[in-house]
Image (cartoon, rainbow, N blue to C red):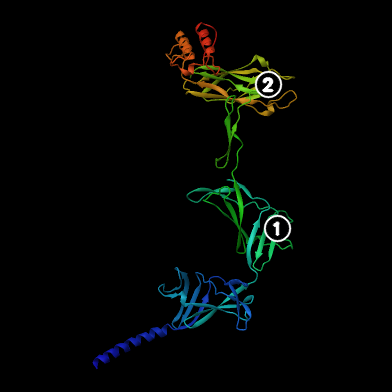
């Protein structure tokens, strides 16, 4: 009996506590406040169904809940706001106690349509039910919403690399931020509506001529402030052929392809052609330096008019005369040349040839580049082949082995005949090939004597002998043959000849 009494008392004590908690948490009412206005587009987001009378009506789906919606529960003990979160399932978390959570599945959302179809305006409701209580949310039904937009430029939109924009830094990397594309008169924006209608708006200038407007065929004007243009860049820097601008209007978006092109340079000469060797040139992007195009320059046709710089050999520290030659001259009245040369060369003197008379002058300074200027009075100078000038260069004492260039160029305006018609000349570079050797020292013993004649004769007769190759071309005509034996023999016999 005592045991029964004690159990009864324990249960009675427990019951005295539970009702207090239960009654304190009784739900009086609920309300639901969406973070954003709920909008349903007319006859979208649902499906056509039949009512009990077999009439068709459009049945809308329940609203899409979103983070930040507030679900308010009025308890008998007071009001509690629950904010919707997704983590990952929807739950409503109390703003007072984060441990107080309502499972989203416990909140039932359903629609109640009047007159078999939602109406336009704000007299449409979606209902929320929880704990035996119900509330409603007003839903805005909008007619004929925009389905999509298409922007069609009147011509291909082109932006050159690193042009029309600005360099910016994101705290880690510099990149080029491009401006919006240059839209032009005649561009069209097509707006497609869900109802099936499409309206084409054409970009035009207004009467003031200082702004752009989008106007339809019936005169309707779009509010340009509602049209936004945003760029979408790849890897912080646009690349040719991989770019687009995103255009947005009333929630719809379209992309416009933009062709980002390199900014090409003029042809850059990497190696000028000669009479026996081809040249090379290229174009590159002036913005990023990428090589865009290369092209071989063919060898100079020896029958064409040309200005040719002589090529010679010399040792470091020597003084050498280099001729500026004109070949196949068709007749000129004026020729003004610009002569550039290597930093290992010092131009000490310019002597114009007697062939051209006295109407020639060099620039006051002989530093590279310097000018050779010639005008032949009241007629053409018609000599086909002649020496234009002789340039005396000193090779620096510390010059390394290799070619030290001498180059000629001209402005076409300053090369013409007596009728002031332009005359085109090819230009062939030359210079001084510096090689560490003693001219005429064929056997490489550091001396020049008859032993070198013997060694050169042996070499040219096919003997297996060692020779100092840089010294073989004794007369410097570009080939090694018996003429070099003759030149060396003359030199060692006291004749007034040069060896190289």
Which class describes the residues within 10 Å of circle 1: few (<14), some (14-19), or many (20+)? many
Nearest to N terminus: mark 1 or mark 2? 1
Residue at position x 68%, y 25% from top? Answer: 415
Please give the label number shown on residue 183: none
Q: Quadrant of residue 122?
A: bottom right
Could you tell me which quadrant the N terminus lies in?
Answer: bottom left
Residue 246 rendering spot, x and y as whole percentages: 59, 57
Residue 363 visible (yes or no): no
Closer-to-camera residue (472/26): 472
Q: Say how many tags the image has.
A: 2
Residue pushed farthest front? 462
Judged from this view, the residue extending furthest toward the bottom is 1
Q: Position of residue 98 (x, y in %)?
A: 41, 72
At x 72%, y 53%, the residue is: 209
Q: Tell me whether the residue at label 1 lies in contact with that at label 2, contact meaning CB atoms closer than 8 angstroms.
A: no
| Residue 300 appears left or right of 105 | right
Name the residue: 55% across, 52% down.
233
Residue 400's place in the image compared with 85, above or below, is above
Indicate the secondary structure of the residue bearing disc 1.
Answer: strand
Disc 2, SS: loop
Foreground mark, 1 or 2, reads: 2
Please name the residue that numbered disc 2 is placed on.
329
Work out how far the residue at label 1 is from the one at label 2, CA to CA, in angstroms.
Answer: 62 Å
* Position above or below: 369 against 26: above
- Residue, disc 1: 202
* Left or right of residue 232, residue 361 in this image: right
Q: Position of residue 87 (x, y in %)?
A: 44, 68
Judge whether 348 appears above or below 228 on screen: above
Mark 2 crowd level (few <14, some 14–19, many ≥20, 10 Å Cα): some
Q: Which sits in the foreground, 309 or 194?
A: 194
Q: Residue 430: x and y, percent?
A: 57, 23
């Amino acid at each position: 009996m005592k045991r029964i009494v004690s159990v009864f008392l324990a249960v009675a004590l427990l019951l005295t506590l539970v009702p207090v908690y239960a009654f304190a948490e009784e739900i009086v009412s609920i309300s639901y406040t969406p973070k954003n206005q709920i909008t349903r587009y007319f006859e979208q987001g649902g499906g056509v169904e039949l009512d009990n009378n077999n009439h068709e009506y459009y049945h809308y789906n329940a609203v899409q809940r979103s983070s930040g919606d507030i679900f308010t529960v009025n308890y008998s003990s007071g009001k509690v706001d629950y904010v919707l979160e997704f983590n990952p399932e929807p739950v409503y978390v109390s703003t007072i106690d984060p441990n107080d959570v309502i499972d989203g599945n416990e909140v039932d959302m359903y629609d109640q349509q009047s007159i078999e179809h939602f109406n336009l305006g704000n007299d449409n409701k979606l209902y929320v039910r929880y704990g035996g209580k119900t509330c409603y949310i007003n839903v805005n039904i909008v007619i004929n919403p925009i389905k999509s937009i298409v922007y069609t430029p009147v011509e291909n939109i082109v932006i050159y690399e690193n042009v029309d924009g600005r360099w910016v830094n994101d705290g880690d990397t510099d990149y080029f931020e491009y401006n919006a594309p240059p839209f032009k008169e005649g561009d069209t924006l097509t707006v497609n509506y869900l109802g099936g209608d499409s309206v084409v708006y054409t970009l035009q200038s207004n009467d003031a001529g200082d702004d752009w407007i989008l106007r339809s065929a019936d005169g309707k004007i779009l509010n340009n402030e509602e049209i936004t243009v945003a760029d979408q860049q790849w890897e912080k820097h646009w690349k040719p052929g991989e770019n687009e601008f995103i255009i947005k209007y009333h929630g719809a978006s379209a992309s416009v392809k933009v062709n980002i092109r390199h900014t090409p340079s003029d042809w850059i000469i990497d190696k000028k052609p000669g009479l026996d060797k081809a040249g090379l040139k290229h174009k590159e992007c002036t913005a990023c330096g990428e090589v865009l195009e290369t092209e071989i320059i063919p060898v100079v046709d020896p029958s064409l008019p040309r200005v040719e710089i002589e090529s010679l050999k010399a040792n470091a520290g020597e003084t050498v005369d280099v001729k500026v030659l004109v070949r196949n001259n068709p007749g000129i009245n004026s020729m003004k040349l610009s002569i550039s040369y290597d930093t290992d060369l010092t131009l000490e003197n310019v002597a114009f040839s007697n062939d051209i008379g006295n109407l020639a002058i060099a620039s006051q300074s002989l530093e590279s580049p310097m000018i050779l200027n010639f005008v032949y009075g009241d007629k053409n100078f018609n000599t086909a082949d002649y020496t234009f000038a002789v340039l005396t260069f000193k090779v620096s004492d510390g010059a390394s082995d290799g070619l030290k260039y001498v180059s000629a160029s001209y402005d076409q305006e300053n090369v013409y005949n007596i009728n002031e018609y332009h005359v085109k000349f090819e230009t062939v570079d030359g210079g001084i090939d510096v090689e560490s050797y003693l001219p005429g020292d064929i056997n490489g013993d550091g001396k020049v004597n008859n032993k070198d004649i013997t060694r050169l004769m042996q070499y040219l007769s096919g003997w297996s002998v060692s020779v100092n190759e840089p010294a073989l071309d004794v007369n410097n005509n570009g080939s090694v043959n018996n003429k070099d034996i003759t030149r060396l023999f003359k030199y060692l016999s006291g004749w007034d000849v040069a060896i190289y």
